[in-house]
Amino acid sequence: MAKHSRIYSVLFNKCPRCGEGDFFVSKSAYDLRNFEKMHKHCPHCGENLVPEPGFYQGALYMSYAFYVAFMVIVFLIVVNFFEQYLDYFLFGIIPILIILTPWFYRLARRAWLAIFIKPAAGEV
């Protein structure tokens, strides 16, 4: 996967412009003190990671889409391959989604910014 691609930056916590600098201060989504803290500017290239106040409200919709996609995929797998465990899916999906909340939060923010910033070196 190219280092200067949008997908790379979204998946690996990197700046969407240079693909080098970290997007969030902490590498782990489960660092309870720093999971939501972002750099205001890329430590490597200086790209503004907080373009305007309220910019990341759109990431709420992306987060919702990630949750829905995850639930539909897991539901289809359970229904098609493990139908006898459907009750476990219904009881287990809420705790799983709660556990994945920090990961989806960070993923949605990186994806939202990656839509608006073109990667360097002309690669998409």
Image (spheres, rainbow, N blue to C red):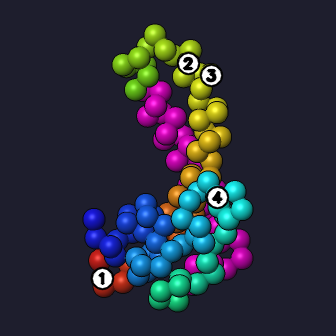
Mark linked to residue 88: 2
Provide the residue designation for mark 3.
91
**Sequence-wise, which precedes: disc 1 or disc 3?**
3
**Sequence-wise, which precedes: disc 4 or disc 1?**
4
Identify the secondary structure beneath mark 1.
Answer: helix
Q: Which of marks 4 and 1 is in front?
A: 4
Identify the secondary structure beneath mark 2.
Answer: helix
CA–CA distance in space, label 2 to label 4: 29 Å
Q: What stretch is highlighted in magenta?
A: 48-76
Mark linked to residue 31: 4
Q: Which amino acid does label 3 sit on?
A: Phe
113 up-or-down from 58: above or below:
below
Mark linked to residue 74: none
**Sequence-wise, which precedes: disc 4 or disc 3?**
4
Q: What residue type is labelled 4?
A: Asp
Q: Looking at the rendering, in which quadrant would you find the C terminus?
A: bottom left
Q: Which amino acid does label 1 sit on?
A: Gly
Provide the residue designation for mark 1.
122
Q: Which of marks 1 and 3 is in front?
A: 3
Where is residue 101? Give x, y as percent: 62, 47
**Sequence-wise, which precedes: disc 1 or disc 2?**
2
Image point (59%, 67%), residue name: 26
**Sequence-wise, which precedes: disc 2 or disc 4?**
4
Give the quarter of the image for residue 78. top left
Q: Are marks 1 and 3 in contact (CB under 8 Å)?
A: no
Q: Is 93 left or right of 69, judged from the image as shown? A: right
CA–CA distance in space, label 3 to label 2: 5 Å
